[in-house]
Image (cartoon, rainbow, N blue to C red):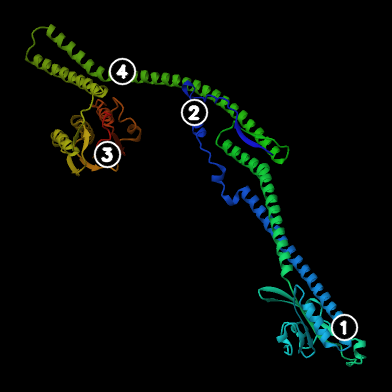
Amino acid sequence: MGDASITSRGAPEPVASGEPGGQPSHSSTASRAVRIPHVERVIPWRHRIKTKLLLVTVVICVGGVTIFALAEGRMADQFFETQAAGAALFSNTIERATLRAMLENRRGDVFDTMRDIGRQEGVEGVRLLAKDGRVAYSTVEREVGTILEQRSDACRPCHAAGRPRLHAPLLERTRVFERGGRRVLGLVTPIRNEPRCATAECHVHRADEDVLGLLDVSLSLASSDARIADFRRGSLVLTGVGVLLLCSFFFAFARLHVVRPVQALVEGTRRVAGDQLDTEIRVRSKGELGLLAASFNDMTRSLRRTEGELKDLNLGLERQVEERTADLQKAQNALVHNEKMSSLGQLAASIAHEINNPLAGILTFAKLVIRTLEQGPPDDATRRDLVRNLALVQRETERCSAIVRNLLDFARDRPVALRELQVNAVVEEALQLIAHQLAIQGLTLERDLQPTAAVRADFGQLRQAVVNVALNAVEAMGKRGTLSVRTRAAADGGVEIVLADTGPGITPENLKHVFEPFFTTKEKGTGLGLSVVYGIMQRHQGRVDVQSEPGRGTTFVLALPPLGAGEGQA
């Protein structure tokens, strides 16, 4: 997957359904406005694939350096073994060079030979040790005659176990020490007793003696260390350059063929999640990542097709919903019209029924008066009958006038003159208006007017509502009972006026119709009083509630909203 990038097809956005003028819908606009953060700001660095690849590269580098260090150490060991072997060969050469002089007991020649050899370049010193550790000869003259202890560097390899080791390996007989700031390789070589040494005429050694003495040579390691350092530096540079080139190649290869394609896939996935379904990934690879990118592009194309099908389906559904909504609206309008006509018919029938009775009485008494007057001048008794009949005509006419007046109050949508007022003042004036009626019927009045917040209301209409409810209660109680009037603060901050009576109560069947026009259970009632109350409370953005049980009285609650709640809605 050598190259990968994210592209958008650039196709024009389809017009969303349900918006005039082809404007995109709210949901589409919101989804298109989603801001997609960059991958490196979403994925922590320790979880990124290039971090893991870099870690693998570092591990490879560290492994390479470690292998180089181990190889270099092994090489140094082998080089040291070579140096030790060279030192052993050098010791054998000295031993062979001095053998003839030793057999002939020419000590001076032996020492001269050792001195000449010790003056060679790279030779730090040569000394000959007796078995007891005494220095018989040394190129360093001050050492001659001294005795070395067993724990000294030259003696320790053979005496480490407490007794001499006659056949110590070569490397155990070597030692490395510093002299004058440079490293020196020391090698102790035993001078063994040969048969010709035991039979020599100059000096005789016992045949059972294995070692006659020790040859201790010291060789400088300066040139060897310099060669090793040069080799180490060169190898380190070559290894470093090789590892660096290898890591660079590996990192570049991984970034080109793994990191970038994966980042492109991640970015494409996030764009698709942000509703950018026109996203496609360009891939130039036939491997696994190329197959994954191709599958991703197939997925986005499938999603685009599905989205188009869903949009077409939504458009069709919206058209169907609009058509069904229009049909329902027509049906609802027709139903409302029918209900209005039905209500108007019921209202007209109620008005005709309420007015027909008094008009029939008026017509009857008018005909009776006309017939009486046509018979001649009335006498006193006839005149009294005429006056009584005309009084009945007057009363029935006033009844018709009251019906028409209450009907006008109910039907007329009179504007309310709202002003800030105290409900208790309205209730006090309403109670004064019905005080005479209470006294005539012998009813008891209980009042409990609590301090309440001010409200905005029409003083006259609110007073009329209180009077209508109170008179309804007075008419229901008859000659005995108690009218209880209370004011209190409502839970929503408004004010409630509570009027309760001890009358016969209202049955559940009639309770559902108490606010309907012309509904009444009293012989002289018009059935419009409570309807007027309902209209007044509606214009004040309030409500009127009623609770009643047969035989336990009735309670009305006039609830007014808090100050400012109904302002501008009257």
**Which callout, 2 or 3, points at the residue further toward the start of the chain?**
2
How packed mark 3 is, by other alpha carbons closer than 10 Å (few <14, some 14-19, many 20 or more), is many
Q: CA distance from mark 2 to mark 3?
A: 53 Å
Secondary structure of the residue carrying tag 3 is: strand
Q: Which residue is mark 4?
A: 348
Q: Residue 37's spot in the image, x, y percent?
A: 53, 41
Q: Which quarter of the figure has residue 347?
A: top left
Q: Which quarter of the figure has residue 365?
A: top left
How packed mark 2 is, by other alpha carbons closer than 10 Å (few <14, some 14-19, many 20 or more), is some
Q: Is residue 151 visible?
A: no
**Which callout, 1 or 4, points at the residue further toward the start of the chain?**
1
**Which callout, 1 or 3, points at the residue further toward the start of the chain?**
1
Secondary structure of the residue carrying tag 1 is: helix
Q: Which residue is mark 1?
A: 99
Mark 4 or 2, closer to the camera: 2
Question: Along the horizontal axis of the image, is 336 left or right of 30?
Answer: left
Q: Quadrant of the C terminus?
A: top left
